């Protein structure tokens, strides 16, 4: 009356190992993406600081109020463009991170199907 579990133990273990590997691969993809995002934010902050420093130096050299307004307008334009560029870059990184994670998960699903079909 007792059922034998010898035959299913190995395939269950293999499926668990494949799922664990898929989770690890997906986690690695997310970790790489987070590193890229952190680097993107660091680059953005450096770019903004550089632009602000340049604008401050330009304001000191201004001869009249209209020159100051011109520097301010250029600074704001540059900051807005940098923000838009940063948003695009973050969206690309996030999409790449999600795609790599999904590929890792899909890859393990294919292995599990192959294992089931060989039983």
Image (cartoon, rainbow, N blue to C red):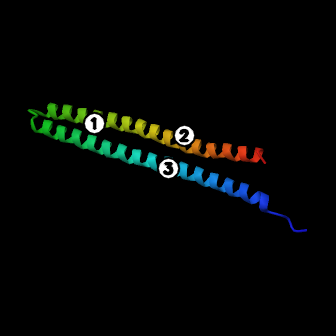
In the rendered structure, find residue 76 and report the number of the disc placed on it. 1
- Residue at image position (16%, 35%) is 68
Q: Nearer the viewer, mark 1 or mark 2?
A: 2
Who's the residue at 53% across and 42% down the image?
100
**Quadrant the N terminus occupies:** bottom right
Instruction: In this rendered view, identify the residue nearer to me: 32 or 41.
Output: 32
Q: Establish if 16 lies above or below 56.
A: below
Q: Which mark is residue 99?
A: 2
Q: How far separated are the C-alphas under marks 1 and 2? A: 35 Å
At horizontal 22% and vertical 36% (from top left) the residue drawn is 72
Crowding at dot 1, Cα within 10 Å, few <14 / some 14-19 / many 20+, comes out as some
Q: Residues within 10 Å of mark 2 (few under 14, many from 20)?
A: some
Q: Is 8 left, or right, of 104 in this rendering? A: right
Q: Considering only order in the chain, which callout, 3 or 2, is on the residue closer to the N terminus?
A: 3
Lower position in the chain sequence, tag 1 or tag 2: 1
The residue indicated by pointer 3 is 28
């Amino acid at each position: 009356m007792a059922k034998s579990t010898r035959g299913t133990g190995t395939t269950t273990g293999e499926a668990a190992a494949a799922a664990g590997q898929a989770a690890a691969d997906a986690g690695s993809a997310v970790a790489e993406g987070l590193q890229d995002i952190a680097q993107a934010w660091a680059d953005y902050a450096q770019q903004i600081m550089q632009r602000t420093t340049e604008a401050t130096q330009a304001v000191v050299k201004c001869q009249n109020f209209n020159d100051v307004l011109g520097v301010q307008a250029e600074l704001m334009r540059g900051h807005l463009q940098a923000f838009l560029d940063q948003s695009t870059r973050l969206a690309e990184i996030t999409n790449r991170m999600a795609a790599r994670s999904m590929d890792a998960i899909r890859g393990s699903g294919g292995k599990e199907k192959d294992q089931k079909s060989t039983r």
